[in-house]
Amino acid sequence: MSNPFYKGIEFRWEEHKRFWNWLAENPVANEIDWPEFNFLPREDKFGICFNCGYEKSFNKKYVPNQCPLSKNCNGTTDYCFGGLYEKWFNSKNLITRSELAKQIANLPIRDDWDWKTSTGEPYGSR
């Protein structure tokens, strides 16, 4: 299924899943190591998040609690994905990092928004 849309803006959910599954398979790696980010200069890779990127495209600036996967995001990493990101980021244990990355990859999309497909039909894979 294609990526979902909310108010006409696409959330790159499939990319989010591919990204975090890659991190689960490569627990030594960090976000900037993802091969699909090779088109960006290294300094621009820090803080890349498909969820925050979606939110910023919708609001043109960061507004807390607009993450497509987390209702409790306040714009700080300790709350990102219900605290999973902070745990992943700070973990030195490769098994733990892999497990946390898998959890993040498989977070469900928020069900309190009216998600649509690119053709305007209700998004049904939730």
Image (cartoon, rainbow, N blue to C red):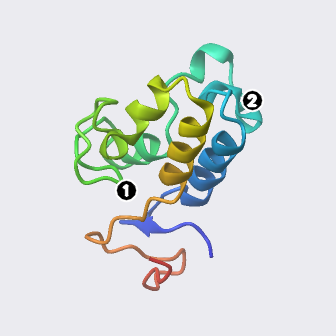
Percent x, y of residue 73? 26, 43
Q: Residue at x 46, y 80 (%)?
A: 123
Q: Residue at x 56, y 66 (%)?
A: 3
Q: In the rendered image, which residue does mark 1 sit on?
A: 68
Question: Tag 2: Cα neighbours inside 10 Å, few (<14), some, or many (≥20)?
Answer: few
Percent x, y of residue 25? 71, 44
Q: Residue at x 54, y 74 (%)?
A: 118
User: As rendered, which of 62 and 15 lies closer to the eye?
Assistant: 15
Percent x, y of residue 61? 31, 35
User: As rendered, which of 92 and 65 lies closer to the eye?
Assistant: 92
Image quarter (top left, top right, bottom left or bottom right) of the N terminus: bottom right
Amino acid type, callout 2:
Phe
Q: In the rendered image, which residue does mark 2 sit on?
A: 39
Up/down of 91 relative to 1, above or below? above
Up/down of 18 relative to 111, above or below? above
Mark 2–mark 1 Cα distance, whole angstroms, equals 25 Å
Q: Is residue 4 visible?
A: yes
Residue at the extreme top of the image, as rendered:
43
Residue 37: quarter of image: top right
Question: Tag 1: Cα neighbours inside 10 Å, few (<14), some, or many (≥20)?
Answer: many
Up/down of 101 relative to 27, above or below? below
- Element on which disc 1 rests: loop
- Element on which disc 2 rests: loop
Amino acid type, callout 1:
Pro
Q: Nearer the viewer, mark 2 or mark 1?
A: 1
Say left or right for 76 vs 104. left
Q: Residue at x 49, y 57 (%)?
A: 11
